[in-house]
Each structure stands twice: as C-alpha cells, then as structure tokens.
Amino acid sequence: MLPKVIEEIIRVIGHGKAMELVREFSGQEMRIPRTESSDTWAALVEVIGERATRALSDAFAGSEAIYIAQCTAAIKAERNRKMIARYDALLKSGHSGRGAVSVLVSEFKPISNRWVEVVVNRPAPTPTGHEAQGELF
C-alpha cells in the first residue's frame, strides 16, 4: 500500500513518472512550484519531464509541502518486473541463462548474480492497478 499522496501523484502523472520522482526525491518534503522560475521546477523537469511537471504543478502548486515517501517495496517490485522482462528478452535474443544473468548484474547494479537468479526464477510481481494502467505521460 502506497501513501495517499503518492497515490495521488500516480493518478496525476502516471506510475513510472511517480516512481522516478520517488527515486530522486524520497525522504524529502517539497513544495511543488507554480512557475518555471524556481530551482525546484528545473529539478522536477530534469527528473520527470516538462509535461509531468506541469501536471504536478496544476494539481499541487500552492498547497502545503508534500512528503515524498521512500516507497521501497514499490520500487523493488518495479525493478524486479523490469529485470524479469529484460531476462526474458535476452533469452529470446539468444543469450544463455548464465549470460543473461551476467548482463543483468551489470545493468541493475548493485546486485549479485545469485540475487538476479532468485528474482528471475520467481513469478513476476503482480502490478497494482496504477502500474497495470500504463503511463499517462
């Protein structure tokens, strides 16, 4: 279960962009700016893009500071889904299982061979409704 404010952010900018925001700003309180003239606006655009920043501003500008929770479990589940999908793609393109694991260790640093094997041999984490809906931006 995600915090209410993160659920609202997902509704406004989509799951992927929200998780990018969480990865970059987790553990911080931030005020969402109204205008492009602030450093916070520039930082948001760099992380989530202009369109998502505008949507976030439309929804949250002028309100109290919002706390960007760490959402560790959601980020880990998203990483694992991506890792499993990449592993399957590597196998389809001709890599051996061991070769695919080596590629994933490099791409998903820091992670060990053994942990990649554990992740790719489990069923993919079930996406929540927000993740299954696809990206809005």
Image (cartoon, rainbow, N blue to C red):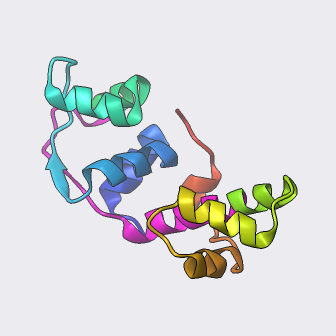
Q: Is residue 43 left or right of residue 115?
A: left
Residue at x-position 15% and y-position 51%: 29
* Residue sitting nearer the eye, 50 or 60: 50
* Residue sitting nearer the eye, 12 or 85: 85
Q: Position of residue 33 (x, y in %)?
A: 19, 29
Q: Is residue 7 left or right of residue 28?
A: right
Magenta residues, start to end: 58-85
Residue 76: within the magenta?
A: yes
Q: Quadrant of the N terminus?
A: bottom left
Residue 136: within the magenta?
A: no
Residue at x-position 78% and y-position 61%: 88
Q: Position of residue 48 (x, y in %)?
A: 39, 35
Residue at x-position 16% and y-position 17%: 37
The reply to whether residue 81 is in sight is no
Q: Position of residue 105 (x, y in %)?
A: 56, 65
Q: Is residue 135 left or right of residue 88?
A: left
Residue at x-position 64% and y-position 54%: 132
